[in-house]
Amino acid sequence: MENLNQSAPETEPAPARPPYIAGGVSRKEFYRDDVRYKSPALATIMSSMPGLGQIYVGYNQQGFINIVVIASLITLLARGIGNLEPFCGLFLAFYWLYNMVDAARKATFYNQSLAGLGPLDLPEGDRLPSGRGSLLGGALLVVGGGIALAHTRFGWSLDWIERWWPMALVLVGAYLLYQSYASKNK
């Protein structure tokens, strides 16, 4: 004979359902309504102007690097660099297209993370934008703005820039090497 005082076996409560399931909408519809959503198509179109798509998504440093690389290649091609012109021209076309694809990819990763689609394995070197400023970017803007102001306000000649602009590449490279060395020693 069964014991009638015996209670029914306890069941675990059902896990909370994510809002996109509880509300009866798909994940895509749910995160597209979020004001933080970044359109991959718009990021691609904006990258027609190199770096602008990455800046739209929040990857400011990568966007400015793309601008500098494209502008440097155009400058080299305009000045005529002899036998390296075909290589630089091909690399310019590749990098410009890479810039557009990368902007769409970064927007997609950003949206997937925003939707909470589980742990997101980003490719090596990609992190979600932190939303904070960059010391190097701020310093470059201050120096560049100071030089432009000195030229427009005080009439300083900018001829020296034509001879000394490669020094900027040396300084940025040294900074990146220092950061890499410092992060390995932590």
Image: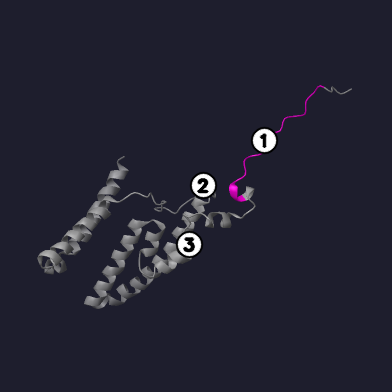
Residue 23 place in picture, x, y as percent: 63, 50
Q: Main secondary structure of the magenta part?
A: loop
Give how far apart the Cα atoms at labels 3 and 1 are. Answer: 37 Å
**Label annotation for residue 13:** 1
**Label annotation for residue 119:** 2
Residue 185 appears in the picture as rendered = yes
Task: Name which residue type carries label 3.
Answer: Ser
Residue 171 place in picture, x, y as percent: 21, 56
Q: Quadrant of residue 58?
A: bottom left
For mark 3, does the 10 Å Cα neighbourhood hold few (<14), some (14 to 19), or many (20 or more) residues? some
Give how far apart the Cα atoms at labels 1 and 2 are. Answer: 24 Å
Q: Which residues are magenta?
A: 5-20
- The structure residue drawn at horizontal position 24% and vertical position 72%, both measured from the top left corner, is 75
Give how far apart the Cα atoms at labels 3 and 2 are. Answer: 21 Å
- The structure residue drawn at horizontal position 22% and vertical position 60%, both measured from the top left corner, is 169
Would residue 32 appear left or right of 54 to someone viewing this image? right
Which is more N-terminal, label 2 or label 1?
1
What residue does disc 3 label? 39
* Cβ atoms under marks 3 and 1 closer than 8 Å: no
